[in-house]
Amino acid sequence: MRRPPPIDIFFTADRHFGHARIIELAKRPFSSVAEMDEIMIERHNKVVRPGDVVHDLGDFAFADHEPYLRRLNGQMHLTLGNHDHPKRVNAVRHLWASIEPLRNITLPGGTHVTLCHYGLRVWSKSHHSALHLYGHSHGRLPGDSQCCDVGVDCWDYTPVSIEEIKVRLITLPKRRDPDHEL
């Protein structure tokens, strides 16, 4: 009997589906919001399989979430961003696997990760090598060896795996923990 492939876990943020002005604000290389939306959906579905898990760290869409969610592979978990309007989010609550303002997860293998739309200075277990993934800054807030921006502007408009994130983290400056380096 053939076993199903393992479930992969992906992270992303700041897609801003349906938001034409983000092209200018974030200097995205798209000629229209329709082109941006289609390319991000295509890139998402190229790496995410239907059974995979996706943690979206906010600012999902500036329009009705349903048309986008129905086209995206994976079990979608939303960590709320500043542009995730409660009316739009609540209208499709049933399509999100979960919705939280901040979440702490433990990945297979034991890696602890704090997920928040905003970049934090300290987070749960940061002094024990826990990671922190964030969005909001569209690549303008530098990370360090334990935290980075997973927004689409930093990752070629594609969700990213923890393995890819860890490869990037080792290239960043060592974390100085203000909590425990007294």
Image (spheres, rainbow, N blue to C red):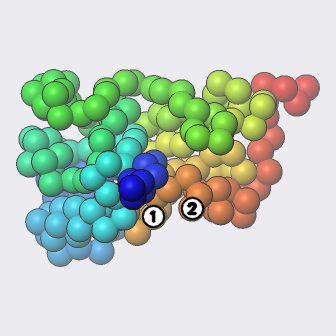
Nearest the viewer among 99 and 37 is: 99
Give percent across and percent down for residue 16.
25, 50
Which residue is disc 1 drawn over? 155
Nearest the viewer among 113 and 28 is: 113
Give percent across and percent down for residue 6.
46, 52
> Which secondary structure, mark 1?
loop
Which amino acid type corresponds to the residue marked 1 in the rendered image? Trp
Select label 2 or label 1 by which is in front: 2
From this viewpoint, is residue 138 visible? no
Give percent across and percent down for residue 34.
11, 66
Which amino acid type corresponds to the residue marked 2 in the rendered image? Glu
Residue drawn at the location 27% of the way across and 37% of the way down: 83
The disc at residue 118 is none
Q: Is residue 34 left or right of residue 2?
A: left
Indicate which disc, 2 or 1, sits on the residue closer to the N terminus: 1
Residue drawn at the location 17% of the way across and 66% of the way down: 38
Local crowd at mark 1 within 10 Å, few (<14), some, or many (≥20)?
some
Classify 144 as above or below 28.
above
Give percent across and percent down for residue 150.
48, 52
Residue drawn at the location 36% of the way across and 64% of the way down: 47
Please report contact status of discs 2 and 1: CB closer than 8 Å, yes or no: yes
From this viewpoint, is residue 39 visible? yes
Which residue is disc 2 drawn over? 164
